[in-house]
Image: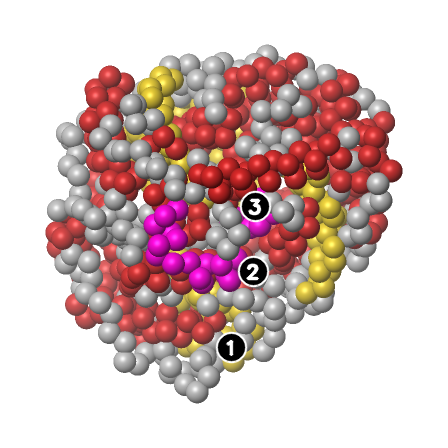
């Protein structure tokens, strides 16, 4: 089951770097009760249509001093004709290349405003969005209006960005899931644009001309084909006045190919409608299609099944989505029980794509080791047939409805998500109120309607099914080797972008934002040593829980690598009073969730739910932390899933490259060196899990942060009640981690994975810890170097000027202990050497010349200005509060962080460069196809 924003599956221009760092007398889960429709999502929304046809949606939300601006264009891959596959996505990239009046990379302008921004292309829509402090609202509106009419689309921009797009597409080719999906969709929809990948094909992208892309822009990027959404802390009337002044002067642009477009639409509608007509129960006598079989290099066997669906406005949509929730909504769902709990599959998921034109329902499964895809397909069909033959139970129906209603509330806690919901509904359903009608219809769905939806749409005769059968079942990486010198010669990077030059293109902020003081959490410790941080926020009826237990993979050791993760993954598999299914239902009946995952320095716990269900969330957490039993049969299932996950990691240039990089930095006896192997995972016993659990899961090594709609006094009493009996003896285990010197010389390692299209490169060495006094200077330094793929030095040179990579980032993984400083990029194999050479030259330039005062000040402002956007999302706030506590920082860090950034001096920056930028000591790891060196070089 996927939330409706599943539709935002377009090809994101990724801009952010993520570094891989009870009382016992409960009864079984009661039958869930259906929830009433949630309070209005669209209350306070005002719709205005300008004279030029632009639809404007405004919603005041005064919970944080930030605003979100989004522009949704009703154009996506659906609108592309033959030979134009991917042109919507190509245009999305070009929209960042500047305008006639502002011929600069727009990513730099957004970054200078402190905007958290992105864009995506999907089947029916292309959207651009940014969230900023409220005083930057007019600036954001000005920039979006400028690029709606005046985008630069010339030979230089297109040539550079075509290379970037092709790098992106080739990156997707690395994924067996992507390749299987492409084959299945082409077969399911051979005459429709939905049958092709949103990003297009390399063959078409290579042939795009400037005239083609300009015509497409002129045709679809017109006010009457767009929706402007503004949510957040603003006053509607004055903002609408600005919108009318800024956007009202934009003219409608004639659609030159309207006739052609309408003709193609008619053909698509015909083939889609006839497909749906065939999808009725009466057509079950039609012969079933044989499976599509791909035999290619890969790690795991995959299955995908697709069934035609109606469009988003069809009255069956609510019943179809409830059907999906019953089939794939969590651990208690039918397909999880039939396929995963039986040991046939390591994972199963599903989702309904209900779009402007008739869409599809898809089911995806990854086979468990040694399991046959044919058997999985058989059990899948038996499960679907059962749904068609017998009405669902009231328990299942109510659980599905509760999950769906809760997911909409939990998924819209921040203003960016709320704006996206409004933009999606207006663009795809033609009505921003669609969500209200949809949820009201969900509440009324009956068992008979679900059964009828299954009969109508899960028709085996209309199924398109594909199997991916890996030809490299062990996921073994090929040869490795070292390489010394081709990366450092004869490359001179361009001059860093001058922020003063940038400033003349930047619209002014309206006034300084009032420094609204961030509330500080209340902190206390239970008698058993468990640390708690509480921050009450009564704006939304939600709870966000973040917790950490000092039981991370650093305690694994090489022989039992994977033990911490297996322990964390088995916590929800049974306690002394509840089995796995009962635990799952306890939460899923209420639309709540609780997840555990082991990282290097701890087990991360994340939980969410509606505020009325806080006791159930806390009681379940306490039960599994105190009373987990680790059933042997569940351990075996989770071991099989871990083995499949390991194979996938070794078959992915990102996963394998990161592992090789990390093991090159840290010696074998260092806790950060260990990674699971098939041998280590197979050697782990149930006794190992019990021993690890008893040793490391202790109240005095656990920290819990709660943010949301609760009474702190009542929560304290609840925590004391459910955790009060949890006790630990002796002192907690402590690791003494040795310091790691930098490599003596530059080190090159290459890992070959057969069958891949793109290379992934990691460059770096051991860095700093979070409490290092240079940390804040390092953040500013990183913002300049590679904190953002569109506005940083690395992004400007390697991505924007040369078009060598889809994304290049740098970051300091600073935890309790020093983690890596690293640069990551994805390139075409033959571009890897040039991109590495460019990166090394930029690092040398930084080391020798430092940064300018203007760059320095711009980077500080960018970090400080974007921080309030992080604090506008309650889920982020709970994570930040927890991290600060675990890292030993003060409670006030969440409030004082921007001041600490502003306090960094140029002297601090120069010292950080001298200490932390060492081009001659780098470890460079490239993973992917073997041909990363051009022939004849």
Q: Marks 2/3: CA distance?
A: 19 Å
Whether residue 215 is in magenta: the answer is yes
Q: Which residues are magenta?
A: 194-216
User: Which mark, residue 694?
Assistant: none
- Asked which quadrant contains residue 133, the reply is top left
State which mark lies toward you, 2 or 3.
Answer: 3
User: Circle 2 is placed at which residue position?
Assistant: 173
Q: Is residue 381 left or right of residue 172?
A: right
Secondary structure mostly taken by the magenta-highlighted segment of the chain: helix
Q: Is residue 533 left or right of residue 386?
A: left
Residue at left 27%, top 76%? 491
- Please tell me whether mark 3 sits on a helix, a strand or a loop: helix
Residue at left 65%, top 45%? 189
Residue 376 visible in the shown view: no
- Asked which quadrant contains residue 590, the reply is top right
On-image quarter of the C terminus: bottom left
Q: Nearer the viewer, residue 466 or 232?
A: 466
User: Circle 1 is placed at which residue position?
Assistant: 931
User: Circle 3 is placed at which residue position?
Assistant: 193
State which mark lies toward you, 1 or 3.
Answer: 3
With respect to residue 230, does 192 lie above or below? below
Q: Nearer the viewer, residue 499 or 664?
A: 499
How far from the left and from the top, in percent, is residue 131? Answer: 32, 35
- Crowdedness near tag 2: few (<14), some (14–19) or many (≥20) residues, C-alpha within 10 Å: some
Whether residue 814 is in magenta: the answer is no
How far from the left and from the top, in percent, is residue 875? Answer: 44, 32
């Amino acid at each position: 089951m996927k939330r409706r924003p599943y539709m935002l599956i377009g090809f994101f221009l990724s801009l952010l770097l993520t570094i891989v760092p009870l009382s016992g007398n409960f009864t079984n889960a009661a039958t869930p009760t259906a929830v009433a429709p949630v309070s209005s999502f669209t209350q306070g929304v005002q719709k205005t249509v300008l004279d030029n046809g632009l639809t404007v949606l405004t919603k005041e939300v005064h919970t944080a001093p930030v605003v979100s601006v989004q522009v949704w264009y009703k154009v996506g891959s659906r609108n592309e004709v033959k030979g134009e596959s991917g042109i919507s996505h190509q245009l999305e990239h070009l929209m960042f290349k500047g305008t006639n009046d502002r011929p600069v990379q727009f990513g730099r302008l957004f970054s200078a405003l402190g905007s958290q921004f992105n864009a995506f292309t999907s089947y029916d829509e292309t959207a651009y969005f940014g969230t900023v402090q409220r005083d930057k609202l007019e600036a954001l509106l000005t920039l979006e209006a400028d690029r709606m009419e005046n985008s630069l689309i010339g030979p230089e921009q297109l040539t550079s960005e075509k290379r970037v797009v092709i790098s992106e597409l080739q990156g997707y080719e690395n994924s067996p899931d992507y390749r299987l999906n492409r084959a299945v969709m082409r077969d399911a929809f051979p005459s429709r644009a939905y049958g092709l990948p949103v990003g297009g094909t390399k063959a078409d992208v290579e042939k795009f001309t400037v005239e083609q892309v300009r015509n497409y822009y002129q045709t679809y990027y017109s006010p009457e084909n767009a929706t402007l959404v503004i949510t957040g802390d603003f006053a509607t009337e004055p903002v609408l006045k600005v919108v009318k002044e800024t956007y009202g002067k934009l003219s409608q642009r004639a659609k030159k190919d309207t006739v052609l477009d309408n003709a193609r639409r008619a053909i698509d509608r015909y083939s889609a409608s006839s497909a749906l007509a065939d999808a009725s129960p009466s057509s079950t006598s039609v012969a079933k299609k044989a499976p599509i079989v791909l035999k290619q290099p890969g790690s795991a066997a995959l299955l995908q099944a697709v069934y035609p669906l109606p469009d988003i406005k069809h009255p069956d949509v609510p019943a179809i989505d409830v059907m999906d929730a019953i089939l794939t909504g969590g651990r208690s769902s039918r397909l999880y029980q039939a396929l995963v709990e039986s040991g046939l599959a390591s994972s199963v998921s599903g989702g309904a794509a209900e779009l402007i034109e008739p869409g599809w329902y898809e089911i995806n499964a990854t086979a468990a080791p040694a399991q046959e895809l044919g058997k999985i397909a058989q059990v899948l069909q038996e499960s679907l047939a059962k749904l068609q033959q017998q009405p669902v139970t009231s328990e299942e129906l109510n659980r599905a409805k509760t999950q769906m209603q809760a997911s909409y509330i939990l998924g819209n806690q921040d203003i960016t998500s709320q704006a996206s919901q409004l933009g999606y509904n207006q663009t795809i359903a033609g009505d921003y109120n669609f969500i209200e009608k949809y949820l009201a219809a969900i509440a009324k769905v009956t068992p008979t309607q679900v059964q009828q939806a299954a009969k109508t749409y899960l028709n085996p005769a209309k199924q398109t099914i594909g199997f991916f059968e890996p030809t490299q079942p062990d996921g073994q990486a090929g040869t490795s080797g070292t390489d010394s010198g081709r990366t450092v010669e004869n490359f001179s990077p361009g001059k860093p972008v001058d922020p003063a030059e940038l400033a003349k293109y930047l619209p002014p902020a309206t006034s300084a934002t009032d420094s609204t003081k961030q509330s500080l959490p209340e902190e206390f410790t239970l008698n058993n040593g468990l640390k708690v941080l509480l921050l009450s926020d009564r704006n939304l009826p939600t709870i966000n829980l973040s917790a950490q237990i000092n039981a991370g993979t650093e305690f694994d050791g090489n022989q039992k690598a994977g033990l911490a993760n297996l322990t964390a993954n088995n916590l929800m598999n049974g306690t002394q009073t509840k089995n796995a299914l009962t635990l799952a239902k306890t939460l899923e009946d209420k639309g709540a969730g609780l997840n555990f995952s082991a990282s290097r320095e701890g087990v991360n716990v994340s939980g969410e739910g509606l505020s009325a269900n806080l006791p159930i969330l806390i009681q379940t957490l306490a039960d599994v932390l105190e009373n987990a039993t680790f059933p042997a049969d569940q351990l075996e299932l989770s071991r099989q899933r871990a083995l499949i996950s390991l194979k996938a990691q070794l078959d992915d240039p990102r996963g394998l490259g990161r592992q090789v990089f990390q093991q090159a930095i840290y010696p074998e006896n260092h806790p950060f060196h260990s990674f699971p192997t098939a041998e280590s995972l197979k050697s782990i016993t149930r006794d190992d899990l019990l021993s690890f659990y008893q040793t490391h899961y202790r109240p005095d090594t656990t920290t819990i942060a709660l943010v949301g709609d609760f009474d702190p006094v009542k929560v304290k009493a609840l925590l004391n009640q459910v955790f009060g009996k949890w006790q630990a003896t002796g002192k907690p285990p402590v690791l003494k981690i040795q310091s790691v010197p930098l490599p003596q010389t530059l080190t090159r390692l290459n890992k070959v994975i057969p069958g891949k299209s793109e290379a992934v490169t990691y460059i770096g060495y051991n860095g700093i810890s979070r409490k290092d006094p240079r940390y804040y200077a390092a953040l500013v330094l990183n913002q300049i170097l590679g904190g953002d793929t569109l506005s940083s030095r690395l992004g400007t040179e390697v991505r924007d000027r040369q078009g060598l990579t889809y994304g290049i980032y740098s970051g300091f993984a600073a935890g309790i202990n020093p983690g890596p400083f690293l640069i990551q990029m994805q390139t075409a194999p033959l571009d890897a050497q040039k991109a590495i050479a460019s990166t090394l030259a930029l690092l040398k330039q930084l080391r020798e010349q430092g940064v300018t005062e203007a760059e320095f000040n711009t980077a500080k402002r960018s970090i400080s200005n974007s921080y309030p956007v992080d604090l506008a999302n309650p889920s982020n706030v709970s994570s930040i509060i927890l991290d600060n506590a675990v890292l030993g920082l003060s409670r006030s860090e969440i409030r004082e962080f921007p001041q600490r950034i502003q306090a960094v001096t140029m002297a601090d920056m120069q010292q950080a460069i001298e200490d932390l930028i060492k081009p001659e000591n780098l470890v460079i790891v490239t993973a992917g196809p073997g041909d990363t060196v051009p022939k004849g070089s």
